[in-house]
Amino acid sequence: MRKVIQNKGITLIALVMTIIILLILAGMSIATLTGENGILSKASFAEEETKKKEYEEILKLIANELRANKIMNNWDNKTFLDEFEKEIPKEEKLKEAEMNRKNDETIIVITKEGYIYEVTENKVEYIGKQGGVEIPKLEESNIVFRYNPSPEEQTWTNGKVDVSIVAQTSEYQLQYSLDAKNWKNYEKEVEVQQNGVIYARLVNNLYESVCQATGNVTNIDATGPTATISFNSTNTNTVSSIIATVEQMDNQSGINITNCKWVYNTISGSIGTNEEDYTGGNFTITPEEIELKVETAGIYYLHVLAIDNAGNKKEIISKQEITVKETDRIPPNDAEITLTSTRVDVGSTVTATITVSDEQSGINLEKCKYIINNSLTKLGSDSTTWDTATTLSGITSNIPITSNTRGSLYLHILSVDNENNKTETVSEGIYFAETVPIFSLAYKSGISCGSYVAWPEGWSHQEAGKYYQILDSRGGLSYMQSNQMFDITNFNLLMLNCIGWNDTGCGGWISLCVCDSNGNIAKRVTQNFDWYTTKSDTNISLNLDVSSLSGNYYIRIELQKTSGRYTNAMKAPVTLIAK
C-alpha cells in the first residue's frame, strides 16, 4: 500500500499570483484616494470652493452696506471704491489681501491664497486664481520713471511732483503703488505729495507681477524755513538806531536768501507772508546785521519773511519788543547843590552834596563833571575846560571844598544826559574868611593927657572942639572917616579895639559906623561911658555885624563927649580890623 504525503506550504506560483492581486487592489485604492477624481482631490476642491465662496460673501456684504450709503450720500463710483478699500482691512480674513484699482469703476481684490475678485458697485465676481500659468521674468529696466520737477536738476517744490511711468512693453498691464500694497492701473502721471518711494510693476491678466521697479521722490520740501532774531539793545529813540542780527536756515531745500525780506513796525501779531508787505528790505547773507531806525516813538517789532528754495514762506516775529522814545532835546535839570556852609574860616572844609537828574533820556554819569574856581561866571557847557574836569562819582555825590586863602569859591556842575544835552549849574559862593587889619595906631603922648595927633592914611578928621587934628572934645561930636569906600561884601564883622577916656569925670559914647555914598549911616554900634570919680582907662571893644551888607561903604569912628573938665582922648593901642 502507497503512503500519500501532504504538502502544507504555498507554491511559488500561488505567491506570485497573490502579490499581483494585492498590487492590483492597492493601485485601485491609491487611484481612488489621490487620482484626479480621488477622494483627496475631491476634498481639497471642496475646501477651496468653500474658501472662494466665503471670501465672495464677505466682499458682497461689504458692497451691499456701502451701496446703501452710496445712495444716501450720493457718492460717485470712485468714492464708493475709496470707501470699499477702507473697509477691506477691517475684515480679519482679508487683512492680508492686496487691492488693485483697475479703473474708477472697478477694484481687484487678491486674497493671500491668490483668489482674485473683481468688485464694482453692482457685482462681486470671482475671476481666477494666481499661479495658473508660468510667469515670465522681465528686467526692472522695462519700467522707467520720469519726474516733474526733476530732483536731478536740483529743482525743489513745496507742492507735488508729477511722476510719469513708462513701460517698455505693451504686453502687460502697468500698475503703480505708494505703499507696495494697494495698486492702481497706471493711466496718467501720478501726483506725489511727499518724498518717498513710488512702486511700479507689470502684471498679467491674473495680476501676477512679471516685473517690479521703484522710483524715489526726493525734491519736495513742505516744512518751511526758520530764523532767529537778536538785538544789541531793546531801547532807543527817534534819532538813534539799534542793530538786529538775523540768521535764517532751512534743513531741506536751503534758504533762498536774496528773496528773504523784513519790515520793522508796531504790529505785534502776524502780518502774513505777502512779500509786498515786507517793505524794510531784502537780505543778502545769513546771518546778517540790519540797522533799525524810526522817526516815531512807540513799541516796535521786527518781522522777517524767510523763503526757502522750494518756495515755502514763513513769518518770524521778534520775541523782544523794541521801545523807541521821542528824541530828548531838553537839557538836564539844574543840579541840586546843598552846601554845609557858605562862610567858613580859611582852611576849613565845606561839603557840597550834588544830585544830577534828567526826565527824558536819563543822565549819562560818565560825562557829568565838576570844577571849583573863584568865578561866578559860567564856563559854558561846551567849554574845553570840562575836558580836564573831575567826573562825578554818582547821581548823588559829596564834594569837599576847602581853601587856604581868603575869598569866595564856586562849584560848577556840568550835567549831561544820554542824548548829550548839557546844563551848567553854579553854586552859591563859599567865602573863606580871615582877619584883615584896616589900620593900627600907636600911642603918642601929647597934650590933653595923651592924644592921637595923627590918623590913618586915607582917612579924614572932623573935630567939634578947638583942638585941630586931635580926636577929642569938650562937648559935641568928633569923628574920623575913611576917604575911600571899602567893599564889605564878604565881611561879616568890623571890630574896633582901643583904650579911651582919661578924665576925673566924664560922660559920653563912642560909635563904629558904616555909611553909604551919601554919608548916611547904614549900620552902627555904640558903647556908652559912665561917670568916673577918679582917673580911669576904659577898654573899648566894638563889634559891628555887617554880614547883611554888600558893596562899597565908608567906615566912620565917632566920639561924643557930653561932659568933663579936661580933654579926653582914645589911648593906644587902637586897631580896626575886619573879618
Image: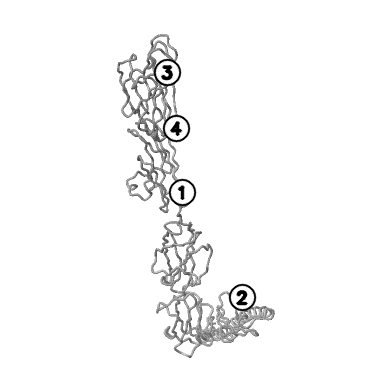
Q: Quadrant of the C terminus?
A: top left
Q: In the rendered view, would you say 439 is above or below 305?
A: above
Calculate the distance from the C-alpha at mark 4 to the C-alpha at mark 2: 113 Å
Q: Are marks 1 and 2 in contact (CB under 8 Å)?
A: no
Residue 87: image tag: 2
Calculate the distance from the C-alpha at mark 3 to the C-alpha at mark 1: 69 Å
Q: Earlier in the sequence, mark 3 or mark 4?
A: 3
Instruction: Give the image location of residue 338, x and y in percent.
Output: 44, 38
Q: For residue 258, what is the image quadrant?
A: bottom left
Q: Which residue is mark 1?
A: 358
Q: In front of the other: label 3 or label 1?
A: 3
Q: Which residue is mark 3?
A: 475
The amino acid type found where label 1 is placed reads Asp
Residue in the foreground of this view, choosing between 575 and 261: 575
Calculate the distance from the C-alpha at mark 1 to the C-alpha at mark 4: 36 Å
Residue occupying image coordinates x 37% and y 48%: 380
Residue occupying image coordinates x 44% and y 84%: 144
Q: Which residue is mark 4?
A: 548
The amino acid type found where label 2 is placed reads Glu
Mark 3 falls on what kind of element? Answer: loop
Q: Earlier in the sequence, mark 3 or mark 1?
A: 1
